[in-house]
Amino acid sequence: MSMNNQGRPSAIPAGAASFDGVTGTVTGNRGLQIEEPLIFEQDSAGRTGVDLPDVPKVASRLGAVKPRARVGLPGLAEPQVVRHYTRLSQKNYAIDSGFYPLGSCTMKHNPRLNEKMARLPGFSDVHPMQPVSTVQGALELMDQLAYWLKTLTGMAAVTLAPAAGAHGEMCGIMAIRSAHEAKGDSGRTKILVPESAHGTNPATAAACGYSVDAIPATADGRVDLEALKAKLGPDVAGLMLTNPNTCGLFERDIIAIAEAVHAAGAYFYCDGANFNAIVGRVRPADLGIDVMHINLHKTFSTPHGGGGPGSGPVVFAESLAPYIPVPYVTHGKDGFALVETAGEGPAFGRMKAFHGQMGMFVRALSYMLSHGADGLWQASGDAVLNANYVMARLDDVMTASFEGPCMHECLFDDRFLKGTGVTTLDMAKALIDEGFHPMTMYFPLVVHGALLIEPTETESKASLDQFVDALRALAERAKSGDVAYFQAAPRLTPRRRLDETAAARKPVLRWTPPVPAEALAAE
Amino acid sequence: MTKKFTKDHEWVQVDGDVATVGVTDFAQSQLGDVVFVELPDAGRVLEKGKEAAVVESVKAASDVYAPVSGTVVEANQALVDDPSMVNSAAEGDGWFFKLQLKDASELDGLMDEAAYKAFVEESH
Amino acid sequence: MRYLPLTEADRQSMLEAIRATSVEDLFRDVPKAARLAGPIGGLPNHMGELEVERLLGSMAAKNVPAGSVPSFLGAGAYRHHVPATVDHLVQRGEFLTAYTPYQPEVSQGTLQVLFEFQTQVALLTGMDVANASMYDGATSCAEAVMMANRVTRRKKAILSGGLHSHYRDVTTTDARFIGFEAVALPAAPTGGEDLLALVDDKTACVVVQNPDVFGHVRDYTDLAAACQAKGALLIVVVTEALSLGLLTPPGDMGADIVAAEGQSFGNALNFGGPYVGLFAVKDKYVRQMPGRLCGETVDADGRRGFVLTLSTREQHIRREKATSNICTNSGLCALAFSIHVSLLGEAGITQLAQLNHAKAVQMADKLAAVPGVEVLNDGFFNEFTVKLPKPAAAVVEELAKRRILGGVPVSRLYPGEMEDLLLVAVTETNTDADMDAFAAALSEVLA
């Protein structure tokens, strides 16, 4: 079998003995930490949190279908609903609460001005299918955002359609395939992807009908140029590369890489997840990149919202500019217009209903205007400075995987834990008790037990120092042999380690209404 | 017949012309708690070295390759109902599937128990 | 700069710790020719809140908000009243600025919300289980077709002519690249399709929409049974999620997969996004579902908690063999959906759905009374198709000049086709005065 050695213990370790930090309260609550049942467990039949006008007395005209009997939803009044969600929110860690050093996620501060701008009725209360004459301001905003993205990347064209980064990757690969097909070049069946790539890269390539071939890394964490050249050939459609790469390093040979890819008749796709390191300082077009997606929810601060929504615009060099999907904004003497159907042109089709994640466009443009060229220059500089500072201050107690300088994130592996019995996972759980969200763990796969730290530019030096001091102390504690401490962590959180094995073996993915007593008696 | 082992951590035991296939104890220890297995249907034709089954733990999904070629005669339903058997009895009741052997000579290239143990120690 | 806390003193002290001479020094791996000498040209310098508000405010003022005039726009996005509570709660920093719940011990808020959302979607659609959301209804539809391909190991999808044209286009785009066949039937404004005749042993799935893009409401129970008899899956698409509050849900009709748009609950129109895709399936297909899933479990102290589960299907584990390449879900939009549905409750959702339908009936009757106008639907939920004596696109432009957003011309979704047809949607936000104004203006424009 293929030995994917990222498998790690998911049941609760034996050392995590039951810890009752509070001598039983009647409610199970702990001061501000409230135990909150499911909303379905708080039902009161007939209650509602909304007052609606009476339904006019008209005969139903539903047609072929009967009205349904009941949905089965619980009824609560507004105060109960507010309390429910407020209590749930208090169980979450968030950027607003503290340092969130997730590598490759760019957890920077989410400015509240952006929220206010997105909620202007002129942006939020416009329907995508209104006559174009009534939404000129919305199209202008999209056009402005497109201008900023093209200028920052040096690229010729952009699509705002994709809903998230992975969606943007799919768009870029579809464009590459369309370009090859337009040239009649159908023998190109492979996409090359570094071993260190994020999982979306090979998944996307496969989703677009390509097979995937992995390129190994060199000892200094970068793509092996010679290995790449050996794999380039007439059957290769493109290379997908992240730069800076997932180890937090700038691909020094990138210009030679681009030249090799182009010489072989292939296209160069860049995964822009790590654009924060170079935004406003380096233009991807100058590196030879043909197409790149940008994560507005990373580099441009649109909020992560517990997992989404994102937005993944894609920029294109001249060579691929004709192959953008619909819809896109055009600007003529009559104002702005929207091209919505692929028609006979080279646009390869449609990525989603309507025009893209407009709510995220407003937020991103608000961020860009707030920072400006000088602010973005400073932001990327501070992001890189912060990561290098963290790396320098941890270098002696933890094992950095590669020599510096790093870019906006620094990578460690678990060699420093060897022989201690403490794993990367245990370190992360102990960090939670210290009041931090852990860094990205076990990614990238090219080192063992990876710990990837991305501070971002919105952290103060004091915040970084506190984090570093905590990590240093934990590293020392691990080396001193206190395994039990780590295996019992976290102790201080609303829930302790959860049994992910049980969750996967017998999935319970929803609340189910209890069987009524009469039905049980009837059985 | 004694068990034979592959470099990909599968084991195979032959009885007449039926081969029973599973993953090794070392493999299950590396995987962690197994939560799901995807087994081939009876009648499926398998090729030596190609994918035959999938074993999933919480954080990883690994392909299981056919150590020898043949046609599947039976998949271990008990494993589908209780995937934890891969962890508790990898080299016994945790077998994955049985197949009708196509070419017994394919067994010659596989390792015996001693050779497999040495292989595991060397590379891990 | 207000978002950047480092001071010059900080930077100096940090550079010393790193043993670097300058920040530029840290960029030495970047090829010299590609390093810009200073802030990029062609863009303005930073602005304070005041200036940003002024700039963006003036852009926003060039748009006509749908709520400022009588609006009857549907075609896959619906203007509903979102209670004030929803927007307050989603802006709590612990929801707004949290990440994907990969560390469940400090993410029980997000996780419990997802578990409740999954339950709400399952209840609304009448299905066994739902995921934690997709990007939108159209990508949900395309993913449903890909899932049907995996489950049946067949490659042909039949798309009803009642499926929204954008949903059709996203699916056919994916079909071309991923390598399956999508047979899209011609648009069917008056029904009359024989989908069953096209189902053979190469068919993976049939995709229908209910209510369909023209507003017709149908019972697909017989079609579901017939598809399944031939080993194909029935996928039902729903673009107006509120309809699930009144109509027999797809699950009760025997649908295998429901792919829907959840925007109607909790989410503003936002010019097309972000929206929230719903995805629900029968129990037996759970492991073939794309997207995130939240499951129930217990923690080290035996207390109930929630975690992301079955993630081995997803891109970060299976990589090229994943069920989908999707990474994010539509987290905050799913939260907004969930809060709105919680506020409505059983009583509220039923009443709201009935209110929408009753108003739509009233509007249909008022429009039918306008000379030259014909309502094509015998039955509908809150959206119907109207046939006009003049091209609908021009009529809509004229109505816009009279400050009425009078529906979506069908030709906008189907260029060059059905130019005399108009889609009209009515919701609880439309008053009697709105409806009378629309009918009067239409009468004027058509005279």
Image (spheres, coloured by chain):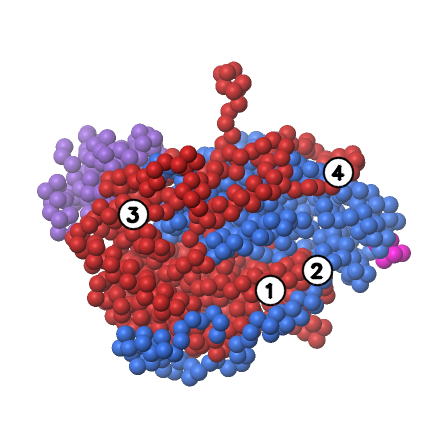
Chain colours: A red, B purple, C blue
Residue at 48% across, 78% down? A374
Expressed as whole percent of the image width and height from the top left, the position of residue C421 reads 76, 51
Q: Circle 3 is placed at which residue position?
A: A489
Residue tagged by mark 2?
C65
Of the residues tagged 1 and 3, which is closer to the observer? 3
Q: Viewer-nearest of labels 3 and 4?
A: 3
Q: Amino acid at mark 1?
A: Met
* Residue under label 4: A55
The answer as to whether the residues below labels 3 and 4 share one chain is yes
Q: Chain of mark 3?
A: A
**From where the camera sits, is residue C204 visible?**
no
Q: Earlier in the sequence, mark 4 or mark 1?
A: 4
Q: Are marks 4 and 1 on the same chain?
A: yes
* Eye-nearest disc, 2 or 3: 3
In the displayed structure, would residue C175 be above or below residue B78? below
State if disc 3 and disc 2 touch (CB < 8 Å): no
Q: Chain of mark 2?
A: C
Q: Nearer the viewer, residue A195 or A513?
A: A513
Camera-nearest label, 2 or 1: 1
* Residue situated in front as seen by the camera: C90 or C395: C90
First-in-chain label (1 vs 3):
1
Q: Are marks 2 and 1 in contact (CB under 8 Å)?
A: no
Q: CA distance from mark 2 to mark 1?
A: 14 Å
- According to the image, label 1 marks what residue? A117
Circle 4 packing at 10 Å, graded few (<14), some (14-19), many (20+), is some
Q: Which residues are magenta?
A: C442-447
- How far apart marks 2 and 3 lie (CA) works out to 51 Å
